[in-house]
Amino acid sequence: MRPGSTFQRVHADDMIETAKVESVGTDAYGIPHVKFKVSFRRPNRHSFDEGSRMLALRTFADRYRERVHA
């Protein structure tokens, strides 16, 4: 996983959540984290950006399993 990688997950209501990795780093306790931008697209084609978020690498990998290839 590296900056620029894109992942997505599809919710039960068919909304697509997309996460684009901005950076990967380790905090002061040695825990790896992913900073990413998240956006959502609904089946009716409405989409919106939620801005940047951060999750522990393991949590990010569990949540966003599907990689989007460019």
Image (tube, rainbow, N blue to C red):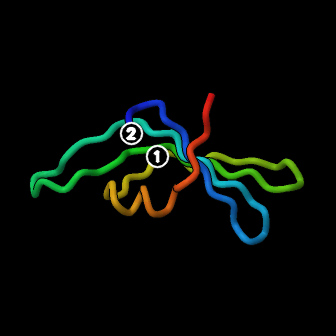
Say which of marks 1 and 2 sits in front.
Answer: 2
Lower sequence index among marks 1 and 2: 2
Residue occupying image coordinates x 40% and y 32%: 3
Residue sticking out furthest to the bottom = 12
Q: Quadrant of the N terminus?
A: top left
Residue occupying image coordinates x 54% and y 39%: 6
Left or right, residue 2 beside residue 6 = left
Location of residue 12 (image quadrant): bottom right
What is the three-letter code of the residue carrying label 1? Ser
Q: Residue 17: which numbered mark, if any?
A: none
Residue designated by label 1: 52
- Front residue of 70 and 16: 70
Residue designated by label 2: 1
Location of residue 35 (image quadrant): top left
Residue occupying image coordinates x 45% and y 39%: 21
Residue sticking out furthest to the left = 29
Q: Position of residue 13 (x, y in %)?
A: 78, 69
Left or right, residue 44 beside residue 64 = right
- Relative height, residue 23 to residue 26 (above, below): above
- Say which element carries label 2: loop
Count numbered badges in the picture.
Answer: 2
- Say which element carries label 1: strand
What is the three-letter code of the residue carrying label 2? Met
Q: Position of residue 5 (x, y in %)?
A: 48, 35
Residue occupying image coordinates x 60% and y 50%: 8
How far apart marks 1 and 2 lie (CA) works out to 17 Å
Q: Position of residue 39 (x, y in %)?
A: 62, 48
Residue sticking out furthest to the right = 44
Within 10 Å of the Cα at label 2, are there few (<14), some (14-19), or many (20+) other Cα atoms? few
- Front residue of 39 and 51: 39
Q: Quadrant of the C terminus?
A: top right
Within 10 Å of the Cα at label 1, are there few (<14), some (14-19), or many (20+) other Cα atoms? some
